[in-house]
């Protein structure tokens, strides 16, 4: 039932749309499996230079479909399988060189919050809100929330969201570092598409190199990281995009990148 998630690719921009608006894009098995199928297809397609994740309806994603979990004969086994399937898609996005842009309106809770946190650039409507929600029904987190949130908003704010149920509004999300910027709700879709299109036209190899270096910075020493930076900038300089960027700078013109 991949119609619950659609995926398109145009001019280097892959757009993934959650399409279960009547249920707040709650994550049923069908939606999660559809999401990971779309991610697998798009990340396996040459020419993807940016990925935009968006959602139809009032809410970005209200989290897991609790009714569907509860109706399973083995809810514990089911929710673990569901989490692992979601994680397959999220891991592919994290490993792909293309920057991930997320556009979130309304409520993002549970795994919806995790999906927001996974973005490299996160654009939110001014009426957006964010909650962990898991512990409110006696569950731990998934989707990378306990890895991403401490790095984005800090340990104390993450603990407050987990233990005290703190809900962030759009302004707080920007101030704490969960979101990149807040945008008027009525123009979120248009502005997110414009920003994603701009990124898709950029130096994809350099973006991918920076994405890898940022991820590695959490698990390596400074001397090792400096060595990795030196290697990466040499690799980038050998690429066509760097040659074009340098030439455009010297010639005082706008660079035209091809993502190589």
Image (tube, helix red, strand yellow):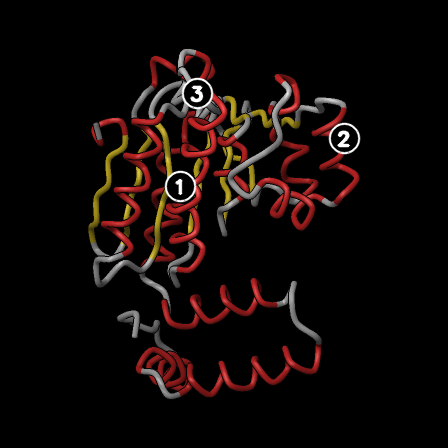
**Quarter of the view holding residue 203:** bottom left
Which residue is under mark 1? 192
Residue placed most toward the observer, 145 or 167: 145
Describe the element under mark 3 as helix, strand or loop.
loop
Residue 175 image point, x, y percent: 69, 40
Q: Is residue 197 above or below residue 132?
A: below
Residue at the location (36% across, 80% down)? Answer: 248
Q: Residues within 10 Å of mark 1 (few under 14, many from 20)?
A: many
Decide: is 194 above or below 19: below
**Mark 2 residue crowding within 10 angstroms, few (<14) / some (14–19) / many (20+):** few
From mark 3 to mark 1, how far is it between C-alphas? 40 Å
The answer to which of marks 3 and 1 sits earlier in the sequence is 3
Quick one: label 1 or label 2, which is nearer the N terminus? 2
Residue at image point 37% right, 49% down = 196
For marks 1 and 2, give the one nearer the viewer. Answer: 2
Q: Position of residue 11 (x, y in %)?
A: 21, 55
Residue 87 appears at what percent x and percent y? Answer: 44, 44
Q: Residue at x 39, y 47 (%)?
A: 88
Q: Which residue is mark 3?
A: 74
For the N terminus, give its image quadrant: top left
Q: Would you say 132 lies left or right of 244 here?
A: right
- Disc 2: which residue: 160
Instruction: Say above or below: 178 vs 62.
Output: below
- Sequence-earlier tag: 2 or 3: 3
**Number of the label disc, if any, that sits on residue 133:** none
| Quarter of the figure with residue 103 | top left
State the residue lying farthest toward the right: 156
């Amino acid at each position: 039932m991949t119609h619950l998630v659609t995926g398109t690719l145009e001019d280097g921009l892959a757009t993934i749309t959650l399409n279960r608006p009547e249920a707040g894009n709650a994550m049923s098995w069908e939606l999660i499996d559809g999401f990971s199928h779309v991610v697998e297809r798009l990340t396996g397609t040459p020419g993807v230079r940016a990925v935009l994740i968006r959602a139809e309806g009032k809410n970005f994603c209200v989290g897991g479909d609790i009714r569907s979990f509860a109706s399973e004969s083995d809810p514990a086994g089911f929710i673990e399988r569901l989490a692992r399937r979601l994680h397959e898609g999220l891991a592919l996005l994290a490993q792909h060189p293309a920057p991930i842009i997320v556009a979130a309106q309304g409520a993002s809770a549970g795994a919806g919050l995790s999906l927001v946190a996974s973005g490299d650039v996160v654009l939110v409507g001014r009426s957006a809100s964010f909650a962990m929600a898991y512990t409110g029904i006696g569950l731990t987190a998934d989707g990378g929330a306990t890895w991403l949130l401490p790095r984005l908003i800090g340990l104390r704010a993450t603990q407050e969201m987990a233990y005290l149920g703190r809900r962030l509004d759009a302004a707080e999300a920007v101030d704490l570092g969960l979101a990149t910027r807040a945008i008027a709700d009525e123009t979120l879709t248009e502005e997110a598409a414009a920003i994603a299109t701009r990124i898709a036209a950029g130096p994809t190899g350099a973006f991918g190199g920076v994405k890898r270096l940022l991820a590695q910075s959490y698990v390596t020493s400074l001397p090792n990281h400096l060595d990795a930076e030196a290697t990466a900038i040499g690799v980038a300089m050998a690429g066509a995009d760097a040659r074009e960027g340098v030439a455009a700078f010297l010639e005082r013109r706008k660079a035209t990148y091809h993502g190589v």
